[in-house]
Amino acid sequence: MRSRLYSSKRSKKAQGLSLTTVVVAALALLVLIILSVIFVGRMARVSSSSKDCLKQGGTCYSLDDGAACPDFGEGLIEHPNAACQRQGADGNQVTDDTKICCIPAS
């Protein structure tokens, strides 16, 4: 009888511990998810601003039919990674497909 009483007390205590562990693990997971959402949001802003032509030292020129950077000045080439930006209707920066980003050839 005594061993049965002892084992039932022991199992209840073990269940309380596992419930606490599950709650702590769930809270830790929630914190990690919130931090990752914040981090990814900031990285997206940094990534979009690093593609801005002006911030990369380039100049934006109006892209007419068949125009290329050498048409706007000798020694100009198209920037391989940057794009010209403009302000969209929602206030965010968007790529301006009507312009070309040119930089001096090194």
Image (tube, helix red, strand yellow):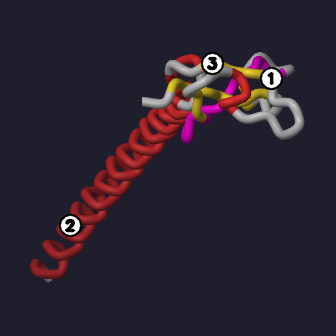
The residue sitting at 75% across, 20% down in the picture is 86
- Packing grade of label 1 (10 A; few <14, some 14-19, many >=20) is some
- Residue 82, horizontal then vertical, whole percent: 58, 33
- Residue 16, horizontal then vertical, whole percent: 29, 57
Residue at the front extreme, as displayed: 74
Is disc 2 placed on a helix, strand or loop?
A: helix
Q: Quadrant of the N terminus?
A: bottom left
The residue sitting at 52% across, 34% down in the picture is 47
Q: Where residue 59 is drawn, which disc sits there?
A: 3
Q: Where residue 37 is drawn, which disc sits there?
A: none
Above or below residue 86? Residue 28 is below
Q: Is residue 52 shown to the viewer in this render? A: no
The reply, left or right, for residue 91 in relation to residue 83 is right
Instruction: Give the Cα separation between the discs numbered 3 and 2.
Output: 76 Å
- Residue 88, horizontal then vertical, whole percent: 81, 22
Q: Are marks 2 and 1 in contact (CB under 8 Å)?
A: no
- Mark in front: 3 vs 2: 3
Is disc 1 placed on a helix, strand or loop?
A: strand
* Residue highlighted by disc 2: 9
Instruction: Give the Cα separation between the discs numbered 3 and 1.
Output: 10 Å
- Mark in front: 2 vs 1: 1
> Which one is in front, 14 or 50?
50
- Residue 98, horizontal then vertical, whole percent: 83, 30
* Residue highlighted by disc 1: 62
Q: Amino acid at mark 1?
A: Ser
- Packing grade of label 3 (10 A; few <14, some 14-19, many >=20) is many
- Packing grade of label 2 (10 A; few <14, some 14-19, many >=20) is few
Q: Quadrant of the C terminus?
A: top left
